[in-house]
């Protein structure tokens, strides 16, 4: 069977064709980042308009790259939320039209379930599994008790990791989105300015990154007041080390507490080299298998949406045609029924 999936939750228009829930036949991603960069962040109205402009072309491109036609498709999956409401609507309307015209089942899909199930495209998930979700808008520790059953153990109380990276990157004068630049600078730094770690309550799996971000800004100001130029690379390193320490320590503690048989890393920040290396080392120490999707499946893409939708396809849990875009959408509520 073939699932055609659409993803438009933020600033990437993506369409994929996935066979049997696992085999990615095409995964076309059209990024708007060059448009938004000049504004230093994603402008919602522009994002919606761009999705409308390219949607038809991207659907055609995904079908042609996969070597299939619309009549071969068995189900239409779409990101229902969370995300920017206007952006989500473009995907939802397109998916509903396709499902109606082709008389195919429609599967409204949770964006973060997509990020997590990108891992199903690279290996077999063993349950219970512990997922560390680190993206531009989310930082969560999620327990997968069994296939498709999500339980959020902890989440950020303020900034998401990617958001913190982008804000620090801006202070270090990098263009948006600056996460990858901070990563590179941190990797090559010779010194480290040690910054605080925000552990919160001893047993908490929650996160907070706004204090760390403020600590970076305060260091920069302190140097400037003294008439010195701030050591950007030592700051990048200090920031990165603090983030990695906290997220990996909490993820490993959760994995042990809930007897996880596997750890999954996902979301755009999973591209971070320091994070991947540290988590890999900790998992090896704990003899826990670790899955990390390749970069293209970590950032927003529609193949991951097809992978998550497959959970519902195999159980016949379909959405009705009055499916609505859900800018705020609970992952736990999206869990499979059966
Ligand atoms: P969400 O999925 O929560 O809605 P999003 O889809 O916008 O958010 P992603 O595309 O998953 O986010 O990730 C983008 C984020 O990842 C950006 O904040 C970017 O700076 C960050 N990022 C990308 N590469 C790296 C890296 N190497 N190190 C740190 N951060 C990175
Ligand atoms: Mg994006
Ligand atoms: Fe995302």
Image (spheres, rainbow, N blue to C red):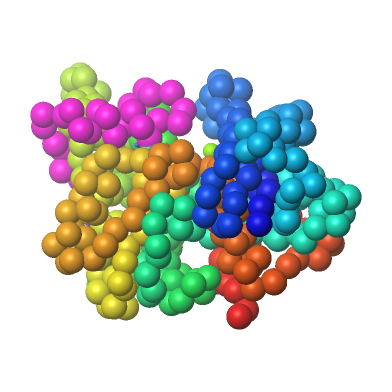
Expressed as whole percent of the image width and height from the top left, the position of residue 41 reads 54, 32
Front one among 25 and 231 = 25
Kindly indicate the quadrant of the structure image that contains residue 155.
bottom left
Q: Quadrant of the N terminus?
A: bottom right
Where on the picture, by quarter, is residue 320? Answer: bottom right
Residue 180 lies, in percent from the top left, at 36, 32
As drawn, which residue projects farthest toward the bottom?
Answer: 338
Report the magenta residues as a range: 171-198
| Magenta-span inclusion, residue 194 | yes
Q: Position of residue 130 (x, y in %)?
A: 36, 67
**Residue drawn at 73 percent across, 33 percent down:** 60
Closer-to-camera residue (137/91): 91
- In the displayed orientation, state which residue is furthest to the left: 190
Residue 207 vs residue 146: left or right?
A: left
Q: Is residue 14 above or below residue 109?
A: above
Q: Quadrant of the C terminus?
A: bottom right
Residue at screen point 41% across, 39% down: 295
Q: Residue 59: within the magenta?
A: no
């Amino acid at each position: 069977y073939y699932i055609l999936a659409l993803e438009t939750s933020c600033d990437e228009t993506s369409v994929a064709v996935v066979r049997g829930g696992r085999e990615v036949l095409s995964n076309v991603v059209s990024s708007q980042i060059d448009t938004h960069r000049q504004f230093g962040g994603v402008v919602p109205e522009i994002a919606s308009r761009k999705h409308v402009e390219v949607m038809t072309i991207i659907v055609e491109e995904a079908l042609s790259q996969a070597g299939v036609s619309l009549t071969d498709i068995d189900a239409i999956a779409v990101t229902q939320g969370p995300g920017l409401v206007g952006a989500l609507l473009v995907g939802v309307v397109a998916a509903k039209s396709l499902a109606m015209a082709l008389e195919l089942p429609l599967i409204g899909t949770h964006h973060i379930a997509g990020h997590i199930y990108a891992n199903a495209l690279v290996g077999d998930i063993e349950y219970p599994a512990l997922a560390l979700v680190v993206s531009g808008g989310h930082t969560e520790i999620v327990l997968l008790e069994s296939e498709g059953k999500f339980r959020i153990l902890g989440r950020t109380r303020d900034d998401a990791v990617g958001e913190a990276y982008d804000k620090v990157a801006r202070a270090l004068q990098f263009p948006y989105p600056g996460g990858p630049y901070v990563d590179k600078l941190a990797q090559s730094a010779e010194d480290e300015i040690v910054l605080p770690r925000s552990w919160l309550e001893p047993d908490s799996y929650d996160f907070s990154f706004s204090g760390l971000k403020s600590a970076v800004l305060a260091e920069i100001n302190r140097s400037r007041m003294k008439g010195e130029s701030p050591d950007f690379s030592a700051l990048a390193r200090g920031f990165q080390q603090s983030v990695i320490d906290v997220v990996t320590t909490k993820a490993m503690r959760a994995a042990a507490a809930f007897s996880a048989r596997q750890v999954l890393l996902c979301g755009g920040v999973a591209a971070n080299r320091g994070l991947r290396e540290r988590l890999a080392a900790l998992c090896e120490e704990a003899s826990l298998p670790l899955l990390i999707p390749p970069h293209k499946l970590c950032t927003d893409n529609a193949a991951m949406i097809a992978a998550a939708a497959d959970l519902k396809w195999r159980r016949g849990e379909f959405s009705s045609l009055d499916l609505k875009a859900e800018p705020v959408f609970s992952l736990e509520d999206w869990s499979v029924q059966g």
